[in-house]
């Protein structure tokens, strides 16, 4: 049996997206260049989360467990089969 695949917990993406969308984007509103960079960063994070979900689906199809991590040293969540 193989070890579960360690992946970031989805909450990490959600927290970053909320911060960028609700605070950073608002603060950069008057600076078009910065606003564009923040918007691009938000799209990149959304794509990363989407790609992680695809990886999770592939693991599920292969019967591999996932070990969601909250930190590098913290206690992992329960593995997803």
Image (cartoon, helix red, strand yellow):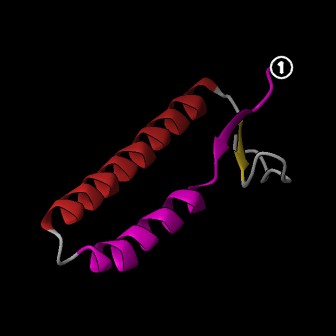
62 relative to 70 in the view: left or right:
left
User: Please, which residue is most extreme toward the left here?
Assistant: 32
The residue closer to the viewer here, 81 or 43, is: 43
Q: Is residue 6 magenta?
A: yes
Task: Residue at 21%, 65% (x, y): give it.
Answer: 35
In this figure, which residue is indicated by the disc labeled 1? 1
**Is residue 21 depicted above or below 36 in this figure?**
below
Name the element at disc 1: loop
Q: Which residues are magenta?
A: 1-28
The residue closer to the viewer here, 45 or 66, is: 45
**Is residue 79 depicted above or below 74 in this figure?**
above
Q: Quadrant of the C terminus?
A: top right
Q: Quadrant of residue 50?
A: top left
15 relative to 17 in the view: left or right:
right
Task: Residue at 29%, 60% (x, y): give it.
Answer: 38
Q: Residue 60: horizontal and vertical position, in percent?
A: 59, 34
Q: Residue 71: horizontal and vertical position, in percent?
A: 74, 52
Badge 1 crowding class, 10 Å Cα cut-off, few under 14, some 14 to 19, many 20 or more, is few
Magenta span: helix, strand or loop, mainly? helix
The residue closer to the viewer here, 10 or 65, is: 10
């Amino acid at each position: 049996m193989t070890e579960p695949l360690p992946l970031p917990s989805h909450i990490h993406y959600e927290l970053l997206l909320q911060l960028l969308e609700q605070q950073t984007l608002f603060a950069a509103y008057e600076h078009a260049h910065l606003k564009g960079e923040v918007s691009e960063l938000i799209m990149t994070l959304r794509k990363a989360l989407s790609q992680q979900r695809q990886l999770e689906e592939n693991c599920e199809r292969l019967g591999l467990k996932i070990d969601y991590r909250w930190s590098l040293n913290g206690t992992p969540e329960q593995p997803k089969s």
